[in-house]
Amino acid sequence: MIDDNEELIIYVKKQIKEHRETINYDSEPRDYIDAFLIEQKKQNPNLEDKSGEWSDMQLIGSCYDLFGAGMETTSTTTHTFFFYMLHYPKIQAKIHEEIDRVIGKDKIITMSDQNSLPYFNACLQEAQRIITLMPINPFHETIDDVIIDGYTIPKGATIIPQFDIVHKDETVFENPQKFDPTRFLDEQNKFKVDDRVMPYSLGKRGCLGKSLAKMELFLFWTTFLQHFEFRPEDQNNLPPFEFDYSLSKNIKPFNVRVIERK
Ligand code: HEM
């Protein structure tokens, strides 16, 4: 992990160097690093502050955070989703049917297709409910006294939100351990967004990458399922529900057969 971290930091430093050599400070930023460098020039032009605000150190740190927060989250959610697809082949077949009927096999799927795939959207929301990638959220602190449901939480208290408790509460979701996308479809089989599903946390310090992550999950998963079928290595011996826990909850590695759909 330390090696990976070092490699990532070397990569980010190289990117910053290349951006600094090629940036045009008078035109629109090409990306996040450009935007930071443009503001850095105004706020800390002589790079006197080596580690505080608008320093290179801060830029390296925020690029590192974006990689860290943005990569493992989407990849772990993705391989856990395909793990569920092995366990729920009928649901996978229904997604295949919807994609074939609405999109077809050849068209490249874009975000403009999202509203025409209600069954898939229900599966995506159900996957994020049941997976709850971060069962224990990063800690927060109250900056004032807060009263919720008659309970006073004093200023300065440490708050550890646990969204998995809501996602798996049977008074909130019936039969919560079951992967059941139909809970998010109405009588006309239209997709219902459900605010009780909160994989990205809430509020001002909720996930900064939520919109990007939602797009990535939609495009990756639909495109994979448009072209491939996912089957267990051994039909009579499905991989077990075993997880490793760090900040996120990671399904243990499993084998899968990926078959091209003709
Ligand atoms: C399936 C994908 C993802 C999930 C489930 C997820 C979930 C979360 C959660 C639960 C938090 C904690 C929020 C809190 O402290 O209350 C968080 C924070 C954050 N996420 Fe994500 N995330 C995902 C993808 C991404 C992506 C793609 C990016 C950026 C490229 C990203 C960037 C961040 C950042 C920067 C924070 C810290 C925000 C802050 O402290 O103000 N995340 N995410």
Image (spheres, rainbow, N blue to C red):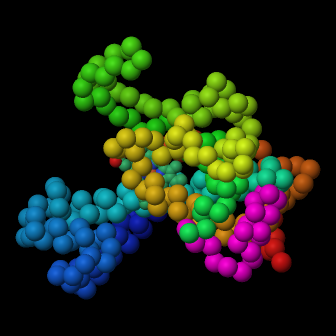
| Residue lying at 17% horizontally and 61% vertically, measured from the top left | 54
| Residue lying at 26% horizontally and 21% vertically, measured from the top left | 145
Q: Is residue 255 visible?
A: no
Q: Is residue 237 magenta?
A: no
Q: Is residue 220 left or right of residue 55?
A: right
| Residue lying at 70% horizontally and 40% vertically, measured from the top left | 183
> In the figure, 206 relative to 153: above or below?
below
Q: Is residue 73 left or right of residue 169?
A: left
Residue 206 rendering spot, x and y as whole percentages: 40, 45
| Residue lying at 67% horizontally and 56% vertically, measured from the top left | 118
Residue 240 rendering spot, x and y as whole percentages: 77, 44
Q: Is residue 235 visible?
A: yes
> Looking at the image, which is closer to me, 49 or 28?
28
Q: Is residue 97 left or right of residue 248?
A: right
> In the figure, 70 relative to 262: above or below?
above
Which image quadrant for residue 29? bottom left
> Looking at the image, which is closer to me, 6 or 174?
174
Which image quadrant for residue 51? bottom left
Residue bounds of the magenta highlight = 92-111
Residue 21 rendering spot, x and y as whole percentages: 23, 84
Q: Is residue 98 magenta?
A: yes
Q: Quadrant of the C terminus?
A: bottom right
Furthest toward the top, the residue is 150
